[in-house]
Amino acid sequence: MRIGILTSGGDCPGLNAVIRGFAKYAFNQIKDVELIGISDGYLGLITNDAKKMKPSDFSGILNVGGTILGTSRQPFSKMTEEDRNGESKLEKMKENYKEMGLDVLVTLGGAGTHKTAALLSSVGLNVVGIPKTIDNDIYGTDVTFGFHSAVDIATECIDRIHTTAASHGRTMLIEIMGNKVGWLTLFSGIAGGADIILLPEIPYDPDEVVKTVKRRIKNGSAFNIIAIAEGAMTVEESKMKKKELLEHRGGRSTGTELLARYIEETAGVETRVVVPGHLQRGGSPSPYDRLLSTEMGTFAGRLVKQGIYGVTVAMKGNEISYNALADIAGKMKFVPVGDQRIQVARAIGISFGDGK
Ligand code: F6P
């Protein structure tokens, strides 16, 4: 059996641990297996850039960040567009799947990767997905690998900001990754003891944020920690079209700086913005993610062995399971506004900037 494997979209800790788990399962449990490493995500499948891998290629990578296969973003919307020769990327991928002699393709990726995986499956390729992303936004799985490592990193950032915020009596805004969903901000915000958490799912009122800042100062807390998701929006911003929003923010993709200035001017407090950015995606996976990655990688191996295709691995409850790609592609897992963690946060006085 000849299996192609690729990693697509933004990287995250745990990709190599999944690749290793899958490869070890395949070499140990599937007869006459050949593993073909496809370079840079779907790009390698489009351009036929791949190489046969040996068992030793998968050793020593459990705790290594990034991906040994390389990755790239290949927008789903461009997959069926025809080039000058009238050929689409989808056509090229189909051709190269054949050319490489693949029996199955394993795709490690996030929401976009899953949409393309579902498309490939719908045109007859045997595909098994594995859900990756620090955003934890893949529909149908409780958790994605990479998420908890990012929670650990973001929490450490908030911890470190706490001490300097306290020394200077400042209001600090820590911008956490997640431009559509707020899982990472919610988890790290609570774990890091933020005073205010702002999520894309709960549009905020800047005056409510200022009110909380002033109230805390009045009550004797000299500093404030605000965990704000990249995609957080004010109520006003949430009604704007993309272009209008960008103009309103002076060309910036997030509203963090704008809010920081508003707080400084209105509450009269010294304010700073910290953007940990890609630090949240770099480095070694946490032990939790190493375990989850190994479980998900080996489970994908089992699906391949059993010939269960057109599916993606998932964690449901406490069990590894799977979903049909067609059922989850194009959907997103947002933070429900009534989420248990939101209730817990509100109960201990954390503000979501919505006056509730
Ligand atoms: O989807 C993962 C993610 O890290 C988002 O949280 C973030 O907004 C985005 O990728 C950043 O993408 P890029 O690495 O392309 O700048």
Image (tube, rainbow, N blue to C red):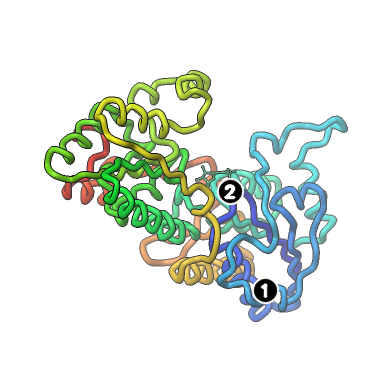
Question: Answer yes or no: do the residues labelled 1 and 2 have beta carbons within 8 Å?
Answer: no
Q: Residue furthest front?
A: 168
Q: Which residue is mark 2?
A: 114
Quarter of the image for residue 198 reads top left
Q: Which amino acid type is shown beneath numbered disc 1?
A: Phe
Front residue of this view, candidates 338 and 222: 222
Front residue of this view, candidates 19 and 2: 19
What is the x, y in percent for residue 94? 77, 48
Quarter of the image for residue 154 reads bottom left
Q: Which amino acid type is shown beneath numbered disc 2?
A: His
* Residue at image point 67% right, 53% down: 71
Q: Residue 58's mark? A: 1
Front residue of this view, candidates 64 and 274: 274
Q: Residue furthest bottom?
A: 28
* Residue at image point 26% right, 30% down: 268
* Residue at image point 57% right, 69% down: 17
Q: Is residue 174 above or below residue 295?
A: above
Say which quadrant the C terminus sits in.
top left
| Residue 74 visible, this orientation | yes
Label 1: few (<14), some (14–19) or many (≥20) C-alpha neighbours in 10 Å: some
What is the x, y in percent for residue 127? 65, 56
Q: Is residue 312 above or below residue 286?
A: above
**Marks 1/2: CA–CA distance:** 24 Å
